[in-house]
Amino acid sequence: MFKRLLQTDHHLTSFIIRITVALVMLPHGAQKLLGMFGGYGFKATMNFFTSNGTPAILAFMVIMTESIGALLILLGFTTRIWAALLTVIMLVAISMHAANGFFMNWGGTQAGEGFEYHLLVIGINLALVIKGAGRWSIDGKLTNK
């Protein structure tokens, strides 16, 4: 079962989408976990989530998925699991941003950001769930001996 979860092809396409989503999500995770890139760090992020009604375990999972999970996707280790978890996070984010419309708030005229970014991340992650980590991945090294 675990081998099937890690199984992947050696296509360059899977590698490209894996690296893309990891490089986009990793800074978001670093904001939440380490306070980098203008973020608030672990404690403040946990306080923000829990003060808004998010159970602590879910807040912790968001922080870990966007940081450690994105790093593991970058390395191509247990990619399908982390891509599936990021998909769930982005679905929740869409529900939170839906009232702001589809488009991001480039002009500063909306009440907040739309959900187009989240939808793109979901599409990328679903491709990783289906195809696996692709070329130059730990998953591939473990299963394609």
Image: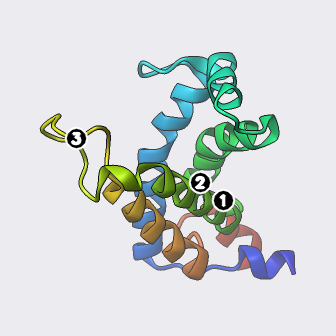
Residue 52 or residue 67, whichever sits in front: 52
Cα gap from disc 1 to disc 3, whole angstroms: 29 Å
Q: Which residue is mark 3?
A: 110
Q: Position of residue 96 (x, y in %)?
A: 49, 49
Question: Contact, CB < 8 Å: mark 1 with mark 3?
Answer: no
- The amino acid type found where label 1 is placed reads Leu
Cα gap from disc 1 to disc 2, whole angstroms: 6 Å
Residue 104 or residue 138, whichever sits in front: 104
> Which is closer to the viewer, label 1 or label 2?
2
Left or right of residue 64: residue 22: left
- The amino acid type found where label 3 is placed reads Gln
Using the rendered view, name the quadrant where residue 71 is placed. top right
Residue 7 or residue 22, whichever sits in front: 22
Mark 1 falls on what kind of element? helix
Cα gap from disc 3 to disc 2, whole angstroms: 23 Å
Q: Position of residue 19 (x, y in %)?
A: 45, 56
Image point (17%, 41%), residue name: 106
> Which is closer to the viewer, label 3 or label 2?
3
Q: Which residue is mark 1?
A: 85
Q: Position of residue 75 (x, y in %)?
A: 60, 53
Question: Contact, CB < 8 Å: mark 1 with mark 2?
Answer: yes
Residue 89: numbered disc: 2
Please report whichever mark, 3 or 2, sits nearer to the chain's N-terminal start: 2
Image point (52%, 56%), residue name: 90
Q: Residues within 10 Å of mark 2 (few under 14, many from 20)?
A: some
Please report whichever mark, 1 or 3, sits nearer to the chain's N-terminal start: 1
Residue 16 can be seen in this image: yes
